[in-house]
Amino acid sequence: MCLAIPAQITEIKEDNMAQVDILGVTRDVSIDLTPAAKEGDYVLVHAGFAIEVVDPEFAQETIDLVRQFPELADMEQAV
Amino acid sequence: MAGKDAGEAMRNSTSLPHGDVPMNLAEFKDPELAKGLIASINALAPAHANLMEVCGTHTVAIARNGIRALMPEGVHLLSGPGCPVCVTANSDIDTVIALSQVPEVTMATFGDMTRVPGSTSSLLKEKAAGRSIEIVYSPLDALKLAKDHPDRQIVFVGVGFETTTPLVAIAIKRAQALGLKNFSVFVAHKNMPNALEAIVSDSSLEVNALILPGHVSTIIGAAPYRFLAQKYGIPGVITGFEPVDVLQGIAMLMRQLHEGRADIEIAYARGVMEEGNPVALAAIDEVFETCTATWRGLGDIPDSGYHIRDEYRLYDAVERFRPLIEPTQNPKGCRCGDVLRGAMTPDACPLFGRVCTPENPVGPCMVSSEGSCAAYYRYYR
């Protein structure tokens, strides 16, 4: 139930609403909870609301961390 | 090296105003990255550890990706009380059913609530009997129903953890701003950290580490879980939902167990900030206050639920309609309560797959697609 899907804001509308593109589908969502969201931003959408602005750089940082993991494990084993 | 190409695309996309979200997520499904993490998990795993996931979306992600079978011997993945529909007490289900029987009321609810059996009925049975019940995707859809049907009283069924609670708070505030007199909410919202304390302090359960929910934490951040590490010595990692996310979360837990540490860490940096979403937390706090809530399987837990503050009492459906609620009966033989505490696996329940199936569910854990019993039925039989 706590599923949230990444989407990209294509247009900020009136009344704290925004049009988003969710995997190719267009929908209007509330940005009451992400007042700083602007056109072009990625947001996590849960039940018709943007609940967070996603920074794509954080996704890259996570992948970089994951890449380091096996070496860490090897080091631990070696100790 | 598909992973490398996807990484290249992701780096490029960050500099473009219209990047491609699916491309960004591709690496979180990359088998090579998954293999590296599985090697780490194997290298770091202690001889024995019980890990509990406390989010229904994790339950499904673990089952669908076959992650349970990838764990080293001695490492067990347990499902906890992470399915909001499943932990909703029978007395609350009965209240929802009673509200649906009020003649002027139209219930607006997320779909999986309609099939959950109460003591003697369900919303689906009520709908078959002619009651007005609408399945909605968002609380905003319920507001629209209220606007479009001024002759009907729209009651939204507010079930869910902190991910959903602020949405309902905003819906109530929007109803107030619009002056809608025909919108109210049945509130059975719950919060996660206090239920986790009930789990880790139960001496009959042995939970050694927690796979913490991604989108609950988008709202509340990491701080509300810290006491679990500090007071109970239980490590926790906030984890996303792609296969690489889940494996990374497990690998980070293994590293903590290996190093003898207990911290609350975030493996889902693209979805969770340390401080959560302060706007959402303020919305919850403005409209709701915490109260003791009854959880199926866990009983009454202080401060683990929400009710509407006096200032917004006008939007409380139970206050508005005071429906007559039937005496609560729990389904005979159903062990959902034990399954939700992680005290029993679904297939150990005598009803599982025989009397209780997704087509004919006895308890809520078989009803919701996120319920442990439904996940076991679909993926492990």
Image (cartoon, grey):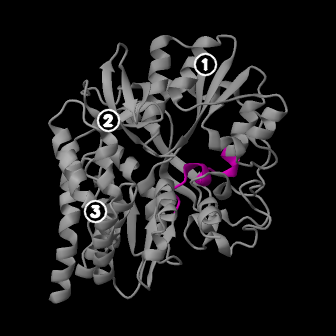
* Residue identified by numbered label 2: A43
Q: Earlier in the sequence, mark 3 or mark 1?
A: 1
Nearer the observer: mark 2 or 1; the answer is: 2
Q: Residues within 10 Å of mark 1 (few under 14, many from 20)?
A: many
Q: Residue furthest right?
A: B129
* Residue identified by numbered label 1: B145
Rendered view: B214 above or below B227: above
Q: Which mark is residue B264?
A: 3
Q: Can the viewer see residue B263 in this picture?
A: yes
Judge whether residue B83 is colored magenta: yes
Pick the front one: A56 or B348: A56
Rendered view: A39 above or below B73: above
| Residue in the image at 78% along x and 33% along y | B127
Q: Residues within 10 Å of mark 3 (few under 14, many from 20)?
A: many
> Do the residues at discs 2 and 3 belong to one chain?
no
Chain bearing mark 2: A
| Residue in the image at 48% along x and 72% along y | B68
- Under mark 2, the amino acid is Val
Q: Give how far across and how far down residue B195 sits, in percent.
A: 48, 58
Nearer the observer: mark 2 or 3; the answer is: 2
Residue range highlighted in magenta: B80-92
